[in-house]
Image (cartoon, rainbow, N blue to C red):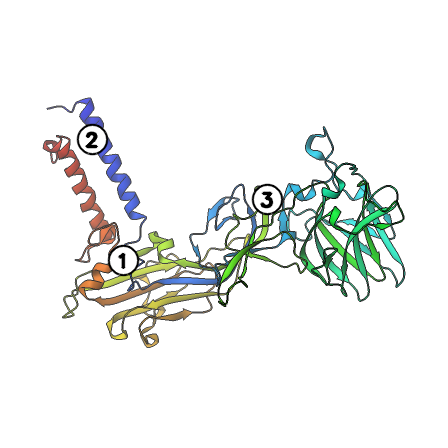
Amino acid sequence: MKLTRTRFAAFAMVLLLVSSAGIAAAATLGANPEADQYPETKIVEDELTVESHDRTEMGWLEYENDNGEVTDLNATVNGTEGDINVAYRADLIDADALGRYPRVDGEENNSVTWLDTTNWTESGATVSDTDGATGSGVDSIEVTADVTDGSSSHAAYAEGSLTDDVEKRYLQFVVNVDELTAGSEVAIQVRDDDGDYVEAVANSSRDGTADDVFANSTASGVIYQEQLGQLPVEGSGDGSLDAVEEVRVVVRDGDATVTMTGLNVEKKSQWDFGDERVLDTSTDEDDDYTDVKVTERPEGGVIEASSLQGMGDTFTDATIHKLVYYNVEYRMQDSPGTTSILFPEADAYPNFPYLWDSSTRLSVPTAYDLTHGNLELTTEQTFLGERYVQLRYAEGVGDTDAENVSDDEWIDLSDSLGEKNTTIAVDDTVQPDSTYVVETEVKLVESQYNALQPVAGGTGGFWGDSAGRSPFHSLYNWLAGGVVGLMTMLGLGRFVGK
């Protein structure tokens, strides 16, 4: 009998479905990592810094590898107390909006910007182009002046002009206070055309929380945003700020230097730099944290958050430089393709019907765009010490298969076994790009064997059966059984074996 077109199509679909399922099975861990007895082995990193995180191109824990490709790190972020997972600094954010002042009607691409140092007028202060000084790709200018007590110098930018709703506009900027000598003061002013101005200052003798103070010490990543109508008007004009004609940086009574990465005097709303995790002072608990919107930061420093999702629309397409992840874990389940887990029958051990038999290969990738912190290889002792048949590891094995690692390369960890449910520090000097193999063999009772089985799988799943056969032997039987069963359902069973 010949195969009809319909049945041939069905047969092809069977092979496609079964082979696809086989691939999926091969990419899953052969155990239940949520089980209490799961002996997790992992490399733990206190801080990982990604040089550039492009929010339009990259997701969580992605980076650009040395071939210029966006790559997943194959890890998980455990974070710190209070669900703090990431940290970033305002002066390391590359966002178009931070340089988008002034806006010129009808101008394509808005090439007029305060970042163009040729449009600043120097009166004793020096304005320099310092693009990349805070972070690669971050545009900035530096204003510096050496002055004596009782004197002042300034630099002025007069390309923008506004006369409507002046009091509703915000003076907003991101700045690094690089130098602020004792007694000196830096003022960033907004001036009209008849001598009136409002200002925010950096002054070591002022309260950093005051509305007209943006810093009281040297700091990086300072954020300042205040409505012009909320600032006191000074100067020699009519006593009211009725226009925005000039932005001026003034240095008084001593030497000072500032680096600016963001400036705007047109917006009627604030930039939203994200949700920072902070201690909740409204409760009596010492470990309660809450989210607070970051719109100002006189002390500068990093913003610590649970994610980047809280950042406002201004930063949807931003690139964040030197993004820090806290407590990154490179776990067995993050790279299941490098872990073999079997559950052979334990005939040699009365009262223990099965063994946990695992071999996991772990390494931490290196790249120009990754800066690693302290790395430690650990394994969880989830059983009594006498249950362990074997616990050992080898370091720097490269691509060598575990069975080909020589005896003198293995380091026995049996002396490290102690109390149940403790963490064993296998190696606290892990080097990135060095490959570790950890082998664990433990005697199991029936209930532990059952609890450790993959949630969606049967006995052993792809990774082997209770007889300890090769995972590929198990895969062959699984695929063959699936093909025969589905072909029989489609009336094609008679062709099997012919």
Q: Earlier in the sequence, mark 1 or mark 3?
A: 3
Amino acid type at circle 3 is: Phe
Q: Nearer the viewer, mark 1 or mark 3?
A: 3
Q: Nearer the viewer, residue 14 or 306?
A: 306
Alpha carbon distance from label 2 to label 1:
33 Å
Amino acid type at circle 1 is: Ile
Q: Nearer the viewer, residue 290 or 432?
A: 290
Q: Residues within 10 Å of mark 1 (few under 14, many from 20)?
A: many
Q: Secondary structure at mark 2?
A: helix
Amino acid type at circle 2 is: Phe
**Image quadrant occupied by the C terminus:** top left
Residue 177: name its quadrant: bottom right
Q: Earlier in the sequence, mark 2 or mark 1?
A: 2
User: In the rendering, at what x and y percent does residue 397 appear?
Assistant: 39, 61
Q: Nearer the viewer, residue 398 or 363?
A: 363
Q: Secondary structure at mark 1?
A: strand
Q: Nearer the viewer, mark 2 or mark 3?
A: 3
Left or right of 19 in this view: 202: right
Q: Residues within 10 Å of mark 2 (few under 14, many from 20)?
A: some
Q: Earlier in the sequence, mark 2 or mark 3?
A: 2
Q: Nearer the viewer, residue 397 or 263?
A: 263
Q: Which residue is mark 2?
A: 11
Left or right of 19 in this view: 231: right
Circle on res. 341:
1
User: In the rendering, at what x and y percent does residue 124 appear?
Assistant: 87, 53
Q: Residues within 10 Å of mark 3 (few under 14, many from 20)?
A: many
Residue 219: name its quadrant: bottom right
| One can see residue 364 in this view | yes
Alpha carbon distance from label 2 to label 3:
51 Å
Q: Secondary structure at mark 3?
A: helix
Q: Which residue is mark 3?
A: 315
